Each structure stands twice: as structure tokens, then as C-alpha cells.
Amino acid sequence: MRGIAATQIGQLARRSVLRTLRQPSQIVPALVFPLFLLAVNSGGLKDATNLPGFPTDSYLTFALAVPFMQGALFSVMNAGTDLARDIETGFLNRLALTPLRGAALLAGLLAGAVVLGLIQAATYLAVGLLAGADLAAGAAGAAVIVVLSVTVTVAFGTLGLVVALRSGTAEAVQGMFPLFFVLLFLSSMALPLELLQTDWFHTVASINPVSYLLQAFRSLLIEGWNVGELALGFAIAAAIGVLGMTAAAAALKTRLVRT
Amino acid sequence: MSRKVALAVAWRSIHIFLTNPAFLAPGILFPLFFFTAFAGGLSAIAAAPGFDFPSGYTAFQFVFVLLQSAAFGGVFTGFGIARDFETGFARRYLLAARDRRGIVAGYAIAALVRALITWTILTAVALVAGMQVGGDGVELLGLYGLAVLVNLTATFWAAGIAMRVRSIQGGPLMQFPVFLILFLAPVYVPLDLLSGWIHAVASVNPVTALLEAGRGFISGDPTAVALAFAIAVTLPLLFALWARGGLKRAEAAA
């Protein structure tokens, strides 16, 4: 039984990975856009490091956490759009005629997000370090950053699956992008939480989970090893992933019944 | 140029924009969102040493978001042109119009109306949020005049792409260069506070002059006005030629 599930996941994972790698239109923006914003923000907001209480004297190091989150947002679009296309083209209907398990389908679809997450994390980290960012946690910290980045990417990827399964159209998935972007902008993306002066903005950023995911990345880049912040980051990513997978499984059931 | 053609095209584009929430919402919400994120989230930057903008950080960011919404109003209109080509409606325009330059003029009018709606809401929100305005009526007219010219430039740029590519797949090509040139200007702090490569790029970026003049207008301290208007008037003229070339390509392909 376990072997069959593994075969099913493996086949779909292979398809998902190949599909991702064969679409430069998915990979290039996910790499270029976050790095462009990193370059612009680290140049334009350099003076923020002069603010009392700013945690580092390198804004590049502070801002390097952001591309990992932006990359995760791209995985919402990519995972969701791929599944939505499968629905639009009728591929999901054909899969529904096979003894394929729902869980295998969802897990397989996320393989592309894992590979993209790995490419993104390695690229952002390499470019950031080459540009002069610090990595206080050292080489082991780099490995943890990559693992955290992939975890966050997969977690957000499940949200893309939910939207795709519920709407059934790639256009609807694309339309969700601004909403996820809002999550990023209304966080401690540009300044640490304690330096956000506008009250309502501080409140929103404080309850926005993205702020704590950013903090987990930043802890490795700026502080070194802060187990509490890392654990919180991984826990939030896992919670988003579990919620997303549960919602996606329910949406898949409904969609297959419709099929 | 046929005024009737321009008005007909403009009316249809405005009607589509106003009656379809999927088109209306992004055009209005995106600038508000950027304004909120920048003015709200980065207000502490005003305390950075050397930052001495007299009207405060909200007004400082308002000018950027106003010009950004002007530019993206034009880009979104380009999306509409591309969509018209995809659906075949633009071919009908080409067949029906006696003077086809009126088609581009119509899209430009629609883009401006669209931008005016966005600016009205954006300005109201900024004032409610406590934006300080130091400029007088003439200076504010200068600020919105710059925004109109930026809107016209972006419309002609996007129209030129849309009529060459004739598919919504040309969207990133319309959008990305505009995004790039806007963000390679002094977005978060004045030019003097930038350093390194971003200062070098921003110093030669024409958007910098527009931003500085706009910020001068809103604070009641006009800065680099002649340079800004020279750029703002030249750009739409140049990009009108670009759009005209696109129209010729579309005519040849029709």
C-alpha cells in the first residue's frame, strides 16, 4: 500500500518538477523580482540603520530575509496556476478516473514548489552574501535558512492549491497575488516591529505571521542562533502548511465529486 | 484626428473600467495599498539624520504614489488595448475608424479619466490620514499637471507595446520597465541621502526630477520645476511616436 502511494507521489512529483523547470516564466520572475527589490531597498533604505534600535548596521543583511518570503509568495502563484491549468485542461478529470489518491496528488504537485524553493533559497543567499550581507549563524545557519525557505515555500504553495481547487481557474489564482503581497507589505518587511511608529500599522504587523517568518530568517542573518525565533518561524510555516493541506484536501474532495 | 473616434473609444474603455470590478479594483486599491505600506510602515525613516522634508513623511510618499498610480494607470490601459486585440475588438476599431490616431487618443483619454478617479480617492485618503500640504493652489496644480503628463507617457509606452505584441502576454513587458524606472528613483528618502550605486542611478533617472519637483510643490518649496516640466513634456511626445509606430504595426498586421 505504502509502495503504491510512493509510486503515485513519485510520478506526479516528477511531472511537477519537470513542469516547473521547463517554465522559465515561473522561475525567472521568482528569482529576479525579489533580488531587484532587495537591491533597490537595501540602497534606498540604508539610512534606516541610523535609527536608534535598528538591529544591524547593514540594511542589506536586514533586507535579505525579504526575498525568501517573496519567493514563497511566488510559489502560491506557481503551484496554484499549475493545478488550475490541470483543471482547465481536463487533466484532473482524467486523473480522477485512475485509482490515484488525493493526498498523493497534492503531495506530488508540491514537488515543483520544493525544487523552486531550493533554487530560490540558494540564489538569494548566494547573491546576498556576495553583495556583502552578513550571516551570523555561519555555514550551518545557511543550511537552516535553506530548509526554512523550502518549508515556507511549500507551506504557501498549499494555499495556491486551495485557491486553484476552489476556483478552478488560473486567472483566479493570479488574482490572489495582490492579496498575498499585502501580507508581505503589512509586516515588518522594511523596519523591525519595534521601530514601526504608526500605531495601526504596528498592530497589523504584530499579528501578521509574515513578520515572525521574517524574524526567523533575520535571527540567523543578524543574531546567530536564536532558538525561540527559529522555532516560532518553523511552527508558523508548519501551521500554514497543515492548514493549507487540510483545506486543499477538502477542496479536492469537493472538486472530484463535481467531476 | 477624429474626435468622434477618440470619444467613442474612450467611452467604451471607461465603461468597461467602471462596470467591471476586476479592472476597477486593482487600479484603485494598488496605489492605496502602496501609500499605506510606505507612509505607514516607513514613517520612522523621517527620524533618520538628514531627512528634513518639511511636510512630513506622509506627503513625501504621497507624491511618489501619485506619480506611480499615474504611470500604472497608463500601463493598465495598455492591458486593455492588448485585450482588445486578443478578442478581435481592436480589429473592428481599425476597420471602422477613418483616422486611426483617434483610437490611441481615445485610449489616452480613458487612461486619464481612470487616473483622475484614482487620484481623487488617493488624495482624500491621504488628507484623512493627516497629510500636511504646504503648497498653494498653483503649486498643487503643478503637481497634478506632472501626474497627467506621466500618465500620458505611460499610456503611450504601454499602447506601443500592446499594439506591437497584440496579446496580454506582453503585459510584463509593459509593466516591468515602468516598475524598474520608478523604483530606481529616490522612493524612500531624498536623493541626497542615497549613496552608492542607487544614488548614481537615481541621479540620472528622469523620474528623480519629477519626484523632486512634485515633492517641492506639495511642500510649498518648488524645486527643479523647469527641468521636471521639460522632461514631463518631452517624454509623452517621444512615446507618442512610439505608439504611432505600434499603430502602424497593428495596421499592417490587421
Image: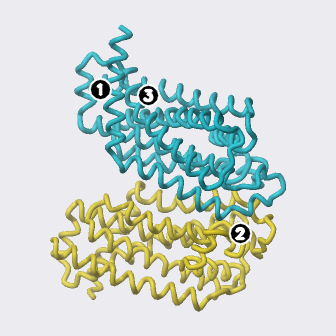
Question: Which quadrant: the N terminus of chain B?
Answer: bottom left
- Mark 1 and mark 2 on one chain: no
The structure residue drawn at horizontal position 64% and vertical position 59%, both measured from the top left corner, is: A42
Determine whether the residue tagged by mark 3 lies in a helix, strand or loop: helix
Left or right of residue A56, residue B254 in this image? left
Tell me, by letter, which chain the rendering colours yellow: B
Marked residue chain, label 3: A
The location of residue B165, given as percent across then percent down, is 27, 66
Residue B95 bears which disc, if any? none
Residue A258 bears which disc, if any? 1
Residue A248 bears which disc, if any? 3
Question: Which quadrant: the C terminus of chain B?
Answer: bottom left
Query: Dot 1, crowdedness within 10 Å: few (<14), some or many (≥20)?
Result: few
Residue bearing the label numbered 2 = B131
- Mark 1 and mark 3 on one chain: yes
Marked residue chain, label 2: B
Query: Dot 2, crowdedness within 10 Å: few (<14), some or many (≥20)?
Result: many
Mark 2 or 3: in front is 3
The structure residue drawn at horizontal position 37% and vertical position 21%, both measured from the top left corner, is: A104
**Is there CB contact under 8 Å for labels 1 and 3?**
no
The structure residue drawn at horizontal position 22% and vertical position 75%, both measured from the top left corner, is: B249
Q: Which kind of residue does numbered mark 1 sit on?
A: Arg
CA–CA distance in space, label 1 to label 2: 52 Å
Q: Is residue B131 above or below residue A114?
A: below
Q: Which kind of residue does numbered mark 2 sit on?
A: Met
Q: Is residue A159 above or below residue B143?
A: above
Display colour for chain A? cyan
Q: Residue furthest bottom?
A: B226
